[in-house]
Image (cartoon, helix red, strand yellow):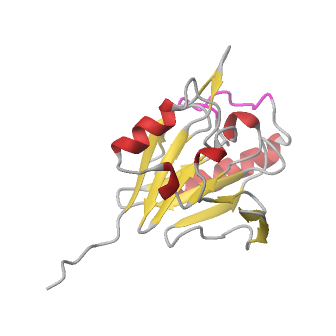
Amino acid sequence: VAAYHAAVTSVHLLTAGYAGDRVASSVVLVRDGDALIVADPGMVASRDRILDPLTAFGVAPADVTHVFLSHHHPDHTVNIALFPNAEVVDFWARYRGDLWLDHDGDGYRLSPRTQLWLTPGHTEEDATLIVEADDAVYALTHLWWRGDRTPAIDPLAWDQASLERGRERVLAAAGIVIPGHGEPFRVR
């Protein structure tokens, strides 16, 4: 008799980002069944800050199926190449090898329990990854920089009003937010 294996959807913060005199993005691993998604593999003090936690979760870089980018600033994208087999997904397309592929935009599902939301504000091209994990609904986003929800006014915002609309949408749906440069915060 084959053992039953329930699909597991989980979210793991690999490294908490920071912004100040130095900058690093929050890098996250999402497991959704067979999908292994790394979000925002950008600047970190050492690539070991991404690779060591992945190894602890039993994930090799070649196993990663998707890389999600919240936006295109280098501090969120620099380490994409660590994941040679991953499809890269941003606000408007998917990239695999030398293919530039469309996706459905707002509401596009990278996997059964993950969904891309268009949330411009920090940049015109921002997106948020919503994850319906087993323990909570997570939002991986740059609508906030830090876990204490600062700065309230994004000093680099393309459009603060759009950013505020995105924040309202995310807060209505998520239980836990992982901001672009900090520790997670609970919504409810």
Residue 129 vs 161, above or below: the answer is below
Query: In the image, is 51 to the left or to the right of 142?
Result: left
Residue 164 at x, y percent in the picture: 73, 45
Task: Point out the stretch of residues depicted in magenta.
Answer: 145-155
Check residue 151 for magenta coloring: yes
Residue 55 vs 47, above or below: the answer is below
Residue 156 vs 20, above or below: the answer is below
Residue plotted at (36% across, 61% down): 134
Q: Quadrant of residue 143?
A: top right
What predominant SS class does the magenta segment belong to?
loop
Query: In the image, is 125 to the left or to the right of 81?
Result: right
Check residue 168 for magenta coloring: no
Q: Quadrant of residue 94?
A: bottom right
**Seen from this angle, which residue lies furthest top?**
21
Query: In the image, is 59 to the left or to the right of 66?
Result: left
Q: Nearer the viewer, residue 174 or 29?
A: 29
**Seen from this angle, which residue lies furthest bottom?**
1
Residue 84 at x, y percent in the picture: 60, 54
Q: Quadrant of residue 67?
A: bottom right
Residue plotted at (74% across, 36% down): 74
Residue 140 vs 8, above or below: the answer is above
Residue 142 visible? The answer is yes
Residue 146 at x, y percent in the picture: 58, 31
Residue plotted at (65% across, 46% down): 81
Residue plotted at (67% across, 61% down): 117
Residue 183 visible? The answer is no
User: In the rendered image, which quarter contains the N terminus?
Assistant: bottom left
Image label count: 0
